[in-house]
Image: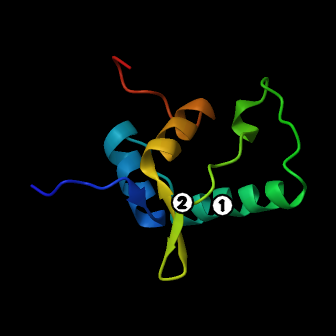
C-alpha cells in the first residue's frame, strides 16, 4: 500500500472527497471553486458572513505542479466540512 501525500490536484480532491465523504463532485465544480476563490481575492478578500458558510472560499493553492494548482488535502478537507459541502463522517 502506498502512503498518500497531502498535496493534491483537482483529480485527487475528487477522489479523496469520494473516499472520505462519499461525495461525488465533477471536475468542473472543483475548478469553479478555484475560480470563485481567485475572484474573491481579486476583490480584496471581502469579509464573509458566518451565516453563509457555503460562501467561504476554497483555501489557496500551496504550490503548482506542471502549471496546475495543488492544495493541501488537510486544508481542503476542513474547508469542505466548514462550508457544508460534505457531511463529516460519523465519529468526527
- Label 2, on which residue? 62
Percent x, y for residue 36?
Answer: 75, 57
Q: Nearer the viewer, mark 1 or mark 2?
A: 2
Residue at the left extreme, as displayed: 1
Q: Secondary structure at mark 2?
A: loop
Residue at the front extreme, as displayed: 63
Percent x, y for residue 64?
Answer: 52, 72
Quadrant in the picture for the C terminus: top left
> In the picture, residue 32 is in which quadrant?
bottom right
What label does residue 34 carry, if any?
Answer: 1
Eyeballing the image, is 61 above or below 50?
Answer: below
Percent x, y for residue 72?
Answer: 47, 52
Tell me: 37 left or right of 27: right
User: 57 and 22: which one is in front?
Assistant: 57
The structure residue drawn at horizontal position 31% and vertical position 45%, both measured from the top left corner, is: 19
Colour scheme: rainbow
Q: How many marks?
A: 2
Amino acid at each position: 500500500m502506498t502512503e498518500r501525500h497531502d498535496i493534491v490536484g483537482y483529480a485527487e480532491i475528487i477522489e479523496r472527497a469520494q473516499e472520505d465523504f462519499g461525495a461525488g463532485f465533477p471536475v468542473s465544480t472543483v475548478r469553479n471553486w478555484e475560480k470563485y476563490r481567485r475572484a474573491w481575492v481579486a476583490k480584496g478578500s471581502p469579509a464573509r458572513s458566518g451565516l453563509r458558510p457555503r460562501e467561504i472560499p476554497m483555501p489557496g493553492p500551496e504550490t503548482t505542479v506542471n502549471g496546475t494548482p495543488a492544495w493541501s488535502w488537510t486544508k481542503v478537507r476542513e474547508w469542505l466540512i466548514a462550508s457544508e459541502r460534505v457531511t463529516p463522517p460519523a465519529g468526527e
